Image (cartoon, helix red, strand yellow):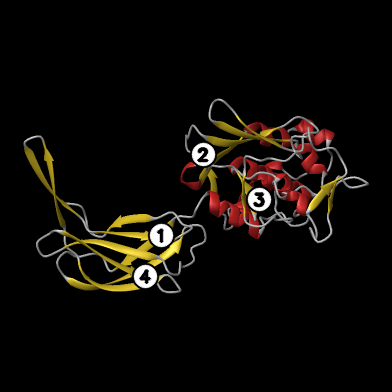
Amino acid sequence: MGFVVNAPLWRDATVPFEIDPEIRDFYTSTAFAAANPGVTVESTRMIEQAIANWNEGASIKLRPRQGESHYLKFKRGPKGNGGQTRATNSGEAEITFDYEWSLGANWTIALRAMMHEIGHAVGLIHEHQRPDREQFIGFNVPTANNGNLQLITNGRPVGAYDCHSIMHYIPRGQPPDIFSKPGGCTGFGRLNDPHLSAGDFAALRYLYPPRLVVDVSPIGVPSQARTYNFRVTSADNGQGVAGASLKLSNGSTNMTSQSTTFVADGQGYASQALTLRYIRRTTVRGRQREVELVAPSIEVSKSGFTSISIPLLVEM
């Protein structure tokens, strides 16, 4: 399904990004127009389309930077450089790209290359560098000293080998540099489809488990018996999460803590008759005893997701 780094690279499964103004300025300049008559496609549109494709269901999202010190910057690269991703000492990650090549190349191929570089930026490794690749593919070129082809042993394979990953190289040249072994791959990469594969999505969910979202109605009212309705969904696609566990921490009649656990149905829905009460919590600090009232809360969990806990009443 995928090949990933050993730890997430981005907090909260969010990548703040910035597009270097030089890219737009260069491609709208009179100098570029004179050197490239008839070319009207702006490279920034390709970046924006790649980001839109990426955000279609991936568990990690790209959004415009809002002053974050750790962010991804799209920059103009040297001529002949199809694409490169690297981290800097300042906390900035860079994707540099020869946008002149992208304007001259097939749009789909250029868009796929940008999707591939975003994959590197969030922690995906070349699929064809997995330790189990020998079962599926072979090479007609030396690989031992090639940083883009040699085996990588310190990554984490996720699921089965994915020949159609956006991170898999496509054979080039004659004879082709990469070839399928018998029973190995039927096709490679996503040459004519600049979107993530099912395996890419699964690898991203492994590295960045999607957050759970829980909606509660009606509004909580203390000490009144009511039936509360819960809907648990996934933050990455808004779909209901079947079998999610909901654990309620509630107060009893004497304000001690008690818990109730119930499970969402196949569409992520659950209903429960509850009387919400505050919980009395006592803290001893030296000779002082402090008493506070804590709101009841619901903790929602499901394997493969990031759990969430929310209060059901206003804190007192």
Which disc is residue 65 wearing? 2
Which amino acid type corresponds to the residue marked 4 in the rendered image? Val
The picture places residue 195, in percent across and down from the top left corner, at 68, 55
Q: Is residue 191 above or below residue 123?
A: below
Is the residue marked by circle 3 packed among few (<14), some (14-19), or many (20+) residues within 10 Å? some
Label 4 belongs to which residue?
263
Residue for point 80% across, 38% down: 143
Q: CA distance from mark 2 to mark 3?
A: 17 Å
Give SS at disc 1: strand
Q: Earlier in the sequence, mark 4 or mark 1?
A: 1
The picture places residue 134, in percent across and down from the top left corner, at 77, 49
Q: Earlier in the sequence, mark 1 or mark 2?
A: 2
The picture places residue 120, in percent across and down from the top left corner, at 64, 42
Name the front one of labels 1 and 3. Answer: 1
Q: Earlier in the sequence, mark 2 or mark 3?
A: 3
Q: Is residue 113 above or below residue 187?
A: above
Residue for point 71% across, 50% down: 132
Which amino acid type corresponds to the residue marked 1 in the rendered image? Val
Q: CA distance from mark 1 to mark 3?
A: 27 Å
